[in-house]
Image (cartoon, rainbow, N blue to C red):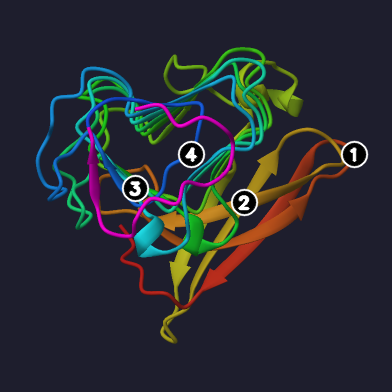
């Protein structure tokens, strides 16, 4: 299916079925790769949504009626590609699940694939815009994969990412990237260093306190998000909260985050 332009679709709030690929446009309230019930794979052999070179496209929305179920596709659920593909947003969708959020209809490759595109947003700073990205990858692909030296400035925030075939988020599409001193390396999202957690303690009051450090680019401000996961997993299923931190002239910052949300440590 082809939807030209860069404005949100006026698709009906009820779940509809699209057998094919949405290219360079926008979609809301649709089933992409599923049947009309949102529970069965239609057998689409390509990407569910392919944004190739488009700008300022929104896939999904903040309400249940705007949510797309993008599942069961033969490659990635959403692909954003090309150096001119910028300012696009993927918000509030189910990628790899059925319409009820059950992880039963994974896309063959990544839930979201960003290739050579910059300054796009998957989710957002508010929990209401987060996507559910689960069951994708068939054992070898990620929940979100970002690759290409020009694929910088892409924000992946407030999503529920779990039970995918490989990493929850992969920068460079080559597995886990180790931190480097000062974060001077280049590549997808500049191969951003990840925080290092030193402790997580739950008090009798029910408050859990997490402490850690971040070493990255000097004198910059970063948004760190905290998630809880089922035991034995490490992607990012349940958002606990966020905080902004600023590194010093050597690129270092320590942080302490507290939440009263229920967490099972271990």
Distance, label 2 to label 4, CA atoms, is 29 Å
Describe the element under mark 3 as helix, strand or loop: loop
Distance, label 1 to label 4, CA atoms, is 42 Å
Give the labeled residue for mark 3.
Answer: 68
Distance, label 1 to label 2, CA atoms, is 19 Å
The residue at the far right in this view is 249
Describe the element under mark 1 as helix, strand or loop: loop
Residue 139 appears in the figure: yes
**Vertical order, 201 against 228 (above or below):** below
From the viewer's perspective, is 55 left or right of 108? right
> Who is closer to the viewer here, 159 or 41?
41
Compare marks 2 and 3 and give the one earlier in the sequence. 3
Residue at the spot 52% in from the left edge and 47% down from the top edge: 8
Q: Nearer the viewer, mark 2 or mark 3?
A: 3
Residue 179's disc number: none
**Vertical order, 139 against 69 (above or below):** above
Give the labeled residue for mark 1.
Answer: 249
Give the labeled residue for mark 4.
Answer: 26
Compare marks 1 and 2 and give the one earlier in the sequence. 2
Distance, label 1 to label 3, CA atoms, is 44 Å
**Residue 12 within the segment the image draws in magenta:** yes
Label 2 Cα crowd, 10 Å radius (few <14 / some 14-19 / many 20+) = some
The residue at the far left in this view is 40
């Amino acid at each position: 299916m082809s939807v030209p332009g860069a404005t949100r679709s006026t698709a009906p709030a009820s779940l509809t079925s699209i057998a094919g690929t949405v290219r360079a446009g926008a979609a809301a309230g649709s089933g992409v790769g599923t049947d009309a019930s949102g529970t069965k794979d239609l057998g689409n052999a390509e990407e569910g949504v392919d944004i190739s070179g488009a700008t300022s496209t929104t896939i999904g929305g903040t309400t249940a009626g705007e949510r797309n179920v993008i599942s069961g596709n033969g490659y990635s659920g959403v692909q954003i590609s090309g150096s001119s593909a910028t300012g696009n947003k993927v918000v509030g969708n189910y990628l790899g699940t059925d319409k009820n959020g059950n992880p039963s209809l994974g896309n063959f490759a990544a839930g979201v694939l960003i290739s050579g595109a910059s300054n796009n947003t998957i989710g957002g700073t508010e929990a209401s815009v987060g996507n559910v990205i689960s069951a994708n990858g068939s054992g070898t692909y990620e929940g979100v994969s970002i690759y290409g030296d020009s694929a910088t400035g892409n924000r992946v925030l407030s999503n529920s990412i779990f039970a995918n075939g490989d990493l929850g988020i992969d920068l460079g599409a080559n597995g886990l990237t180790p931190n480097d001193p000062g974060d001077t390396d280049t590549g997808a999202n500049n191969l951003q260093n990840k925080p290092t957690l030193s402790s997580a303690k739950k008090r009798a009051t029910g408050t859990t306190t997490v402490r850690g450090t971040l070493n990255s680019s000097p004198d910059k401000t970063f948004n760190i998000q905290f998630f809880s996961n089922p035991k034995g997993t490490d992607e990012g299923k349940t958002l606990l909260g966020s905080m902004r931190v600023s590194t010093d002239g050597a690129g270092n910052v320590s942080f302490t985050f507290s939440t009263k949300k229920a967490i099972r440590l271990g």
